[in-house]
Amino acid sequence: MKRLTLLLLGLALGVTATARAQGLTMQMSNGWAFSFSGNVNAFWVFSKATQGGPTNSSVRTGLLPSFATFEARGKESGMNLAVHFGFAPQINNGVPAGSGPGYDGGSTHDNFGNGTQAGAQIDMRQVYLTVGGQWGQILAGRELALFGRQNILNDQTLFGVGAVGVGGGGGGGTTLGRIGYGYVYPNFNAQVTYSTRPGTPAQLSIGLFQPSVVGASPYLYTKIPRVEAELTWNQRSGKNKYTAWAGGLWQTTSNAPDTGGASLSSFGGTVGLRGDFQELSVVVSGYVSKGLGTVLGFSDVAGGPVSANDSTGRPGDGGYVQFGYTFNKKTTLSGSWGFSRLKNASSGEGAAVNNSAVRTQWTAYTVGIYHQWTKSMKLVFEGTREQEGVGGASPAQTDVSAGFMLFF
């Protein structure tokens, strides 16, 4: 489990020393080293929605996409230099135009009835360089954002499927896991980020990011970069290990291209704590936001980040708790519960006339068995109950999945 977790951190965050140890490394004649590592995963997912919703089966990638990562590292003028490329392909074919929600991801056909493969999506998630030394490290390029990244990296469903979205059981590509059901997805963004030197209990990262337009609102003009930061703290006490983190995000956008018009400030704050007590692990995390939305940051999914009057950012919050127990150092049984919600942010919006009324709320329970079959192969069995809304009448769905994850 520890080996796979470290590799996963390498895939998601560029901590490639671990990835090199498990993948292929070649020492070049010019003093540089080239490495290749990654993972492939595939899951069968069965989903049954309530309220007359669809029943679907699909074979698809889990929350973590398959990854093929390439990296070159060298040292010049006393500085550690590296470039990193991370490809995240899917196992499903592309979805032809006009296909319904039950499309099976199979081959399309031409006018003569010949099967043609539509081509799987290849997501170029990582393209960045790093330069570092005793003073720390600068990362420049496209990589996982800082705000909320510890929430997803400590989520049990990163090794599985989790939620797929009510009514979305027939889709392909990556699943939601607990995105939108406990935290906002940090996204892979263009950035320039400074991190303090590792090896100490506390590490700080702060960066300037390519800003995002705010959903379908008129706030389309991004005049200054977004700022994100993360502080992590790690400590051991005997056989126990403790990890704590706090993160923040701030961005301002405008509805006019010049100095006129109105501006909208979006912000987010998150904290979390993980404790590993030999076989038992516990994770608790939470976040608050305004003008950020939910599920995918700054998107209009699940209600949108801006109120109906196009002037106020909707407040949001959420979090999750998770427990895991490992038997015989190979099999981990985990369970978690989490939610994400948005509230009204302008008087008269929705049925309620106060700003604290809940507009949307997504909730999910997940239980899973994660078995280390071999040193590199993991078997995963999961069940998730997800709901969009509050109360028995709200749309809900049960997702059952089983699959393989092979890391190299």
Image: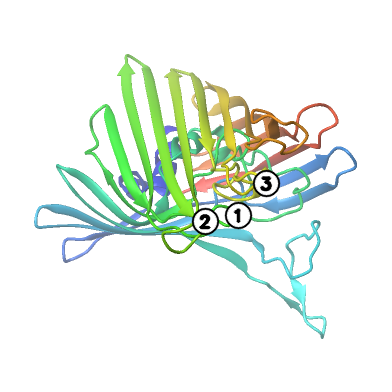
Give the spatial CA distance, label 1 vs label 3.
9 Å
10 Å neighbourhood of mark 2: few (<14), some, or many (≥20)? Answer: some
Name the element at disc 3: loop
Residue assigned mark 2: 213
Q: Tell me residue 71's x, y (percent).
A: 33, 58
When the figure is inspected, residue 314 is found, relative to residue 239, above or below; the finding is below
Which label was assigned to residue 308? 3
- Asked if labels 2 and 1 touch by Cβ distance under 8 angstroms, the answer is yes
Q: Is residue 408 in view from this perspective?
A: no
Q: Label 3 is placed on what type of residue? A: Ala
Image-based side of 348 in relation to 270, left or right: right
Which label was assigned to residue 217? 1
Using the rendered view, name the quadrant where residue 339 is placed.
Answer: top right
Please tell me which residue is depicted at 54% across the width and 42% down the height of the picture. Answer: 291
Residue placed furthest toward the bottom:
112
- Asked if labels 2 and 3 touch by Cβ distance under 8 angstroms, the answer is no
Residue 17 or residue 311, whichever sits in front: 311
Q: Tell me residue 259's x, y (percent).
A: 41, 59
Image-based side of 345 in relation to 114, left or right: left
Please tell me which residue is depicted at 78% across the width and 34% down the height of the picture. Answer: 351
Residue 301 or residue 336, whichever sits in front: 301
The chosen color scheme is rainbow
Q: Label 1 is placed on what type of residue? A: Ser
Please tell me which residue is depicted at 57% across the width and 23% down the height of the picture. Answer: 321
Q: Label 2 is placed on what type of residue? A: Val
Residue placed furthest toward the top:
238
Give the spatial CA distance, label 3 vs label 2.
17 Å
10 Å neighbourhood of mark 1: few (<14), some, or many (≥20)? Answer: some
